[in-house]
Structures are given as structure tokens and as C-alpha cells.
Image (cartoon, helix red, strand yellow):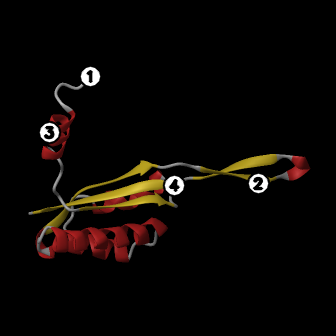
Amino acid sequence: MAKGHRSQIKRARNAEKDTRPSAKLSYARVSVQKACYVLDSIRGKDVQSALGILTYNPRYASTLVKKLLESAIANAENNNGMSAENLYIAECYANKAPTMKRIKPRAQGRAYRIEKRTSHISIVLDER
């Protein structure tokens, strides 16, 4: 059980909030494993080289991540007043989201379950 009054607890929680610019894509129609291949290639890189990598990456997830990265850059410039030249990718990760379950008919009256996996992709930027 938490100690203190509700307002004190909220004040303490808001004091430790992360102020780094970020962007999140929820319910992306790509599995976590496939998204992580793309995210691993840009983690820790500066923003301009990451955009170049994502532009020429043939994977489907790279188009989603590129759009998300551009959104995070815009958030950094407009909300935090940061310069795009100094930004780098501090964190990027994909978490599991709900799986859509579908049925596919097969031979001899059987039915196979098809799982259409989704993910939540997050990018956090920071200044060098």
C-alpha cells in the first residue's frame, strides 16, 4: 500500500516523469520479432543516419518506424525546442499487443487458427 495522501502520491509520480521527446505507435500490424529487426538496426544512431537506414530498408516495418521517427523528431522540435541535428535514438523497443485470431479452412473439414500479431512500437530521442 502506498504511503501518503493521494495528491502527494500523484505529485511524486509526476516529478519523476520522463521529459525526453518520444513517439508511440499502438496496434501496429507487424509482429514484435519483425519490428525488432528494424529497431535493432537504428538503436543508438543519430537521427539523420537512422532515417537513411530506414529509407532503404526493404522490410515492411521500416516504413512504420520511419514515420514514427519523423513524428518523434517533430515532437522534439515543436514541444521541447530541440534541434534535429543534435538528436539521437536513446531507446526504441516493440512490445506485444493483442493478437487477432482468425480461422482458415483446411482440407477434410478441418480449421486452422491464423494468428495476426500486433505490436506497440516506441521511440525515445535524446540530445547529444
Determine the residue positioned at 42% across, 68% down.
Answer: 64
Residue 12, label in figure: 3
Q: Earlier in the sequence, mark 4 or mark 3?
A: 3
Task: Specify few, some or many for label 1: CA neighbours under 10 Å numbering under 14, 14-19, or 20 or more.
Answer: few
**Real-space CA distance between mark 4 and mark 3, rounded to the nearest whole angstrom:** 33 Å
Mark 2: few/some/many CA within 10 Å (<14, 14-19, 20+): few
Hey, which quadrant is residue 65 in on the image? Answer: bottom left
Please tell me which residue is depicted at 17% across the width and 58% down the height of the picture.
20
Q: In what element is the residue under mark 3? A: helix
Amino acid on which disc 4 is placed:
Thr
Distance from Cα at disc 2 to Cα at disc 4: 19 Å
User: What residue sits right under mark 2 in the picture?
Assistant: 104
Q: Residue 38 at x, y = what percent?
A: 38, 62
* Alpha carbons under labels 2 and 1: distance apart: 48 Å
Q: Between tags 2 and 1, which lies in front? A: 1
Secondary structure state at the residue bearing disc 2: strand
For image coordinates 41% across by 49% down, the residue present is 95
The three-letter amino acid code for the residue at tag 2 is Lys
Q: Which residue is mark 1?
A: 1
The image quarter containing residue 122 is bottom left
Relative image position of residue 31 (x, y in whole percent) = 50, 55
Is 10 in front, or is 90? Answer: 10
Residue kind at label 1, given as amino acid type = Met
